[in-house]
Amino acid sequence: MGYYITHMKEKIITIKPKGISQRQWSIFLLELNLIKKAWKSYGVDVQMSAPGLKKIIDWGTKKYGTDHS
């Protein structure tokens, strides 16, 4: 007999880093993005939302030697 999960409740995490500098914030978001990418291969779709997230990830994931403007 196989048991299949047909519906899983959405899980939400709220993280509020206090005392974080702008540089630390950028690195923190880039590290969370790495975790998101790693878990994707296990079928986990992580949705992230934060101020400046897209800009930080775009800047932090560009290949070396590309224009960062």
Image (tube, helix red, strand yellow):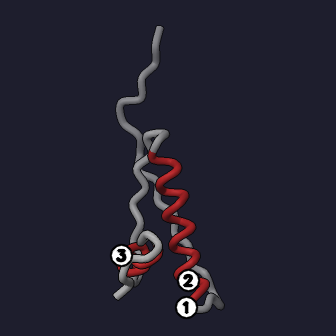
Q: How many residues crowd around disc 2 within 10 Å: few (fewer than 14), some, or many (20 or more)? A: some
Q: Determine whether 66 is above or below 37 in the image.
A: below
Callout 2 touching callout 1 (CB < 8 Å): yes
Towards the viewer: 67 or 35: 67
Which mark, residue 32? none
Which mark, residue 25? 2
Choose the circle earlier in sequence order: 3 or 2: 2
Towards the viewer: 31 or 8: 31
Mark 3–mark 1 distance (CA, rounded to whole Å): 15 Å
Split into 4 quadrants, where in the image is the C terminus?
A: bottom left
Q: Who's the residue at 47% across and 41% down the image?
A: 41
Q: Determine whether 45 is above or below 1 in the image.
A: below
Residue 32, quarter of the rendered image: bottom right
Residue 21 rendering spot, x and y as whole percentages: 61, 91
Q: How many residues crowd around disc 1 within 10 Å: few (fewer than 14), some, or many (20 or more)? A: few
Q: Who's the residue at 40% across and 50% down the image?
A: 45
Provide the secondary structure element on which disc 3 rests.
Answer: helix
Q: Amino acid at mark 1?
A: Gln
Q: Farthest residue in the top direction?
A: 1
List the residue tagged with mark 3. Answer: 54
Residue 37 rendering spot, x and y as whole percentages: 47, 54
Choose the circle earlier in sequence order: 3 or 1: 1
Residue 38 rendering spot, x and y as whole percentages: 52, 50
Mark 3–mark 2 distance (CA, rounded to whole Å): 13 Å
Q: Amino acid at mark 3?
A: Lys
Q: Who's the residue at 41% across and 66% down the image?
A: 48
Provide the secondary structure element on which disc 1 rests.
Answer: helix
Provide the secondary structure element on which disc 2 rests.
Answer: helix
List the residue tagged with mark 1. Answer: 22
